[in-house]
Image (spheres, grey):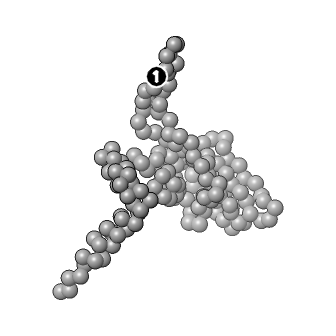
């Protein structure tokens, strides 16, 4: 699968994504609406912006037209779907691509991609454990996990043969 060329990373400031969908809502006359899960997995739409100089825009243009065929071919690019920037298999939605030159020499390329969230890489048990750790340790959860990693990977490796 093609990969977004190195150095062509989405800008974080102009980064957003829509909800995952999959929930149906039915109006009930004289009562509260009913909700039901239509599907559990599925793609989300991510608004992506690349700010490219002349060279990077040339590389992007070649990649866009010849490698991913204007978005028809799935490719890997780094996205943050909730767990930090990770490679996601994406497709560009038709009709969402735009490129404009800024006042200087930079090109601003914007488009919408569809990708499945990395949250589906974890199980429901993993999700519950993550929530439990956060509920117990709050904002210090990362410090706890970093310390555990230090203990497991460095502090206990003191055997000298």
- Residue 150, picture quadrant: bottom left
Query: From this viewpoint, is residue 123 visible?
Result: no
**Is the residue 139 above or below the residue 71 in the image?**
below
**Is the residue 125 above or below the residue 39 in the image?**
below
Label 1 packing within 10 angstroms: few (<14), some (14-19), many (20+): few
Residue situated in front as seen by the camera: 113 or 135: 135
Residue shown at 42% from the left, 48% from the top: 119
Residue shown at 48% from the left, 27% from the top: 24
Task: Report how many numbered discs are placed on residues in the image.
Answer: 1
Left-right relation of 142 to 90: left
x, y percent for residue 68: 57, 52
Which quadrant of the rendered structure holds the C terminus? Answer: bottom left
> Which residue lies under the disc numbered 1?
34
Residue furthest left in the image: 161
Residue shown at 38% from the left, 58% from the top: 137
x, y percent for residue 111: 64, 48
Residue furthest right in the image: 103
Residue furthest top in the image: 29
- Residue 11, picture quadrant: bottom right
Left-right relation of 127 to 6: left
- Residue 14, picture quadrant: bottom right
Q: Secondary structure at mark 1?
A: strand
Query: From this viewpoint, is residue 6 visible?
Result: yes
């Amino acid at each position: 699968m093609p990969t977004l060329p190195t150095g062509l990373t989405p800008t974080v400031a102009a980064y957003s994504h829509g909800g995952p969908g999959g929930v149906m809502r039915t109006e009930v006359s004289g009562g509260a609406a009913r909700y039901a899960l239509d599907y559990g997995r599925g793609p989300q739409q991510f608004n992506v912006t690349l700010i490219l100089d002349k060279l990077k825009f040339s590389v992007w243009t070649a990649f866009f037209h010849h490698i991913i065929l204007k978005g028809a071919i799935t490719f890997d690019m780094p996205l943050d779907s909730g767990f930090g920037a990770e490679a996601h298999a994406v497709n560009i939605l038709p009709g969402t691509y735009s490129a404009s030159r800024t006042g200087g020499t930079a090109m601003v390329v914007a488009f919408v991609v569809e990708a499945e969230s990395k949250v589906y890489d974890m199980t429901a048990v993993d999700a519950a454990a993550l929530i439990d750790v956060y509920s117990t340790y709050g904002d210090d959860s990362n410090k706890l996990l970093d310390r555990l990693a230090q203990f497991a990977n460095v502090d206990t490796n003191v055997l000298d043969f």
